[in-house]
Amino acid sequence: MKTINMAAILDWMSEEEALTDMFNRFDTDFTGELTAEQLQQLHAVLRDGGISLPQVEASIEAVCAAETCDRQELCDVLNEMDRRYFLVRDLQWEFAMLDREKKGIISEGQARFLFQAVHDDFFSPRRWLKFLRSRAVPGSGISFAEIEVPLCDIPTMDWLDEQKHDEDKAREEVLRRKQEKERAVEEARKAAENKARLEREAARRREDASRKKAEAEAAKLKAEQEEAERKAREEEEERNRKKYEEDMKKLSEEEAKLREEEESLRLEEAKRLEEEDRKRREQEEAAQKWKKEELLKQQELEREREERGKQ
């Protein structure tokens, strides 16, 4: 591109005329707007070497209303490009000081140090983390071209507001997590209390069921014992009845025998009849006495059994 002698131009025309003339020279498409590439070419005429295309685009973004630059915005955008131009020179020197091995790259820690030195109190950890996450290869060395634009960006209060917003959000998150933890602890405590209460109720129900079962088994055993005792009494009474009947039958048989003997004895001699009559009476009395004694014994045994059954 042909070099333009700007000093000569400014000698014979005003600043506005010079800006208009330069604008028209690079507005080759006659659109009334300059693209980032056209602005880069224009600025390279004014400043030796100019600035990189990303720096030009950042200047347009900072000053212009659109992605291109019109005539009214030219002066302001050139001033912004100049600011970046001279700042880049200083930053390149500082970058070279950090790049001791002359590899054209520095570490992420060194780059952070450079950002903190340039932006001072306006350094934004949030923007720095955002930059690190956006890198194609996180952790790799950082070239000057990778950081020159954000280094030249003018810090604003918005950066601090963003940082404060992030810090407030972080505090809110910490508070939320703390509240959630406290809520979880409280819910766990209530759950444990509820579990303990349910376990106590279940244990009480088991105890009640066990007690009722024991009572039922005891009642059943008692009923079985009473039934067994009743049957035993009935059997004993039946045995006594049968024995009594047998005794009575035996007694009747004996009495019949005695009557037969008496009848035969009446045919004997009078003396023997009298003696036999006496002996018969004695035998009858003895038999009656024995019968009574036996009966009394049976009654006594029955009373003793009834008393044992009641006990």
Image (cartoon, rainbow, N blue to C red):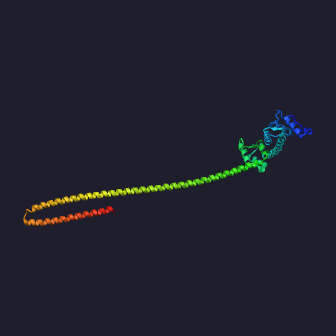
Residue 268 at x, y = what percent?
7, 63
**What is the x, y in percent for residue 47?**
85, 40
Q: Which residue is drawn at 7% across and 65% down?
A: 270
Q: Nearer the viewer, residue 247 or 102?
A: 247
Q: In this view, which residue lies farthest toward the top?
A: 29
Residue positioned 46% across, 55% down in the render: 206
265 or 125: which is nearer to us?
Answer: 265
The quarter of the rendered structure image containing the C terminus is: bottom left
Query: Viewer-proximal residue, 254 or 143?
Result: 254
Residue 283 in which image quadrant: bottom left
Q: Residue sitting at 75 percent across and 43 percent down? A: 142
Q: From this viewpoint, is residue 288 visible?
A: yes
In the image, is 25 to the left or to the right of 264? Answer: right
| Vertical arrangement, residue 88 with respect to residue 257, above or below | above
Which quadrant of the figure contains the N terminus? top right
Residue found at the far right of this picture = 12
State which quadrant residue 69 falls in. top right
